[in-house]
Amino acid sequence: MGAFATILLLVLTNCFLPVLLLPSTGNSSSSSSGSACGLTTTTIRKPLIVNGVTSVAAGQWPWHASIWHRVTRSTHIYVCGGTLLSELYLLTSGHCVSKDGNALNERLVSVQLGSIRQNLLLNGFPVQNVPVAEIVVHRDFVPRTFQADLALLALGTKVMINEFVRPICLPNATSADDGEEDLVGRQAVAVGFGMTETGENSDVLRQLWMPLVDYLTCLESNREVFGMSLSSAVLCAGNTNGSTVCNGDSGGGLFTQEPTDGRWVIRGVTSFTAQRGWNDSSCSLSDYAAFVNVAHYGSWISYVMAHGDQEGFFNGTNQPMSVMRVQSVTSKPIKLELRTSEKYCKLYRRKGLIVTGTDGPSQIYLFKTQKSQGLAYYLTDDFAITTAGLAIDCLYGETVCQTVIGKRIRQAFIHPEYRGGRDFNVALLLMPPADEPLWCLTAEASGKIYFEGRQLKANTISADAATWTEFDLDFYLPTKRGGVVYNERRDIVGLMHNPAGDEVVMTNIPAVLDWIESIVWNNGSLYRVSS
């Protein structure tokens, strides 16, 4: 078999066989990614016992996360580890969150933090279960060779930083290409769940200390496995004595502690090792393991965390680009420029401000003289969206609509082509600052759309126009005026025109998105009805 036949994807279960701890050596500079990064409130136990059960206390490794895939509507399985870098970003292996090199749908992935047990059902202090808003797999990731085996997960909500959940520090930005020489000989620790010396998954978090070795030692140990994979972008570590990272440890971090300030720094991300035998796909206990060199990809990590995507990193001028990288950029199709609303949506997702499946529907009930008028939804901290008919009714007369907590509409922007019918029935409300999560807008028609959790199937459409769609349903739908219709990502697709009992008609948001963007993000309209 070829060289790649023995390389093992570490994604199904995992293995940690503890070994005797050796004193930490070497000097490697690190910089904190935040004032609280890389610190723990729990004493790290040492030494460990060879082939013994490693006991990990809650809060001992507060940056370690477990990554779960949804396989059915109500079933999830554990697949990989990850490492928290900030309130909103998690680092893991590319092969943990991709298929055939393409990122998985973020709705299929969940993250658990603060737990020392492998159980997604745990959800209460100190455990935090967090949805994923976006998966960014490194553009150069190659599944067969594990090149650039790295991914960042943008979390759907900010995590609560405490003694049990805390980010680790990133390596110093100046050590991007010389990390291997600085780290060789140092002791590092990896943590994770899963396959142990018994061949079964571990229910509790385990830890393993291992020395970092140089490229030549790693290469000569198994040229068939490491011959085409080792570079400055890869770190090699292990004991080759029966203790190693194994199936399912992928994505977890390899950490070192700085002697100067005691902070922990992430040095590597578990990527691959050799398999045990021709008919045994579990990890080899006599080979080193390969880790993505985090310092080598430090600029990419920082860029994605700051901008929410990687396109600018490869297409821009923020970094020196080799001839090889320029060639790879020009050989790929150019991504179309994002709309203004999409750019802001990505920004809000990074900040954890967007509505998710767990914190919806996040609607504003509008009342006038103690009578409900309908619903609106925040798009930014100041602007909410609703129908034109509702906005006009809210502002007509001596009183103005307000929310249940007394927030009054400040201004209403009515679509200039609205004439009282179904066409262009949309308005924007200038409101006091939002307390509710924000909504994204879809720029394209959606195949699957929902109202209050119920799918509106395309074959039920009885009539439609450029700016509105009517549904002829075979069931009663208790609609609300201004009620939001959304797609699978929970982006707004439309707004209901009428209350329950009337025809089910919605405004098509993609058809009026240009006007919405001109008001909300450009402040360029004079179409206003004021109080």
Image (tube, rainbow, N blue to C red):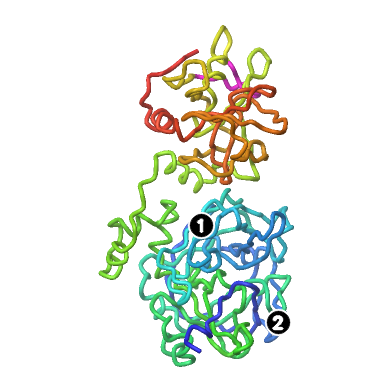
Instruction: Please give the label number shown on residue 234.
Output: none
Q: Position of residue 244 (x, y in %)?
A: 60, 82
Instruction: Please give the label number shown on residue 135.
Output: 1
Q: Position of residue 136 (x, y in %)?
A: 47, 58
Q: Secondary structure at mark 1?
A: strand
Q: Position of residue 25 (x, y in %)?
A: 49, 81
Which amino acid lies under the numbered mark 1 shown in the image of this protein? Ile
Q: Residue furthest bottom?
A: 220
Q: In the rendered structure, which disc, 1 or 2, sits on the residue that comes first in sequence? A: 1
* Rendered residue at 54%/51% (across/down): 133
Look at the picture and state if 443 lies above or below 213. above
Q: Which residues are magenta?
A: 401-410
* Rendered residue at 55%/42% (across/down): 354
Q: Is residue 102 on the magenta stretch?
A: no
Residue 356: quarter of image: top right
Residue 455: quarter of image: top right
From the viewer's perspective, is 407 left or right of 137? Answer: right
Q: Residue furthest top?
A: 398
User: Disc 2 marks which residue?
Assistant: 199
Residue 263 visible in rendering: no
* Rendered residue at 65%/45% (across/down): 358
Which amino acid lies under the numbered mark 2 shown in the image of this protein? Gly
Q: Position of residue 473 (x, y in %)?
A: 67, 32
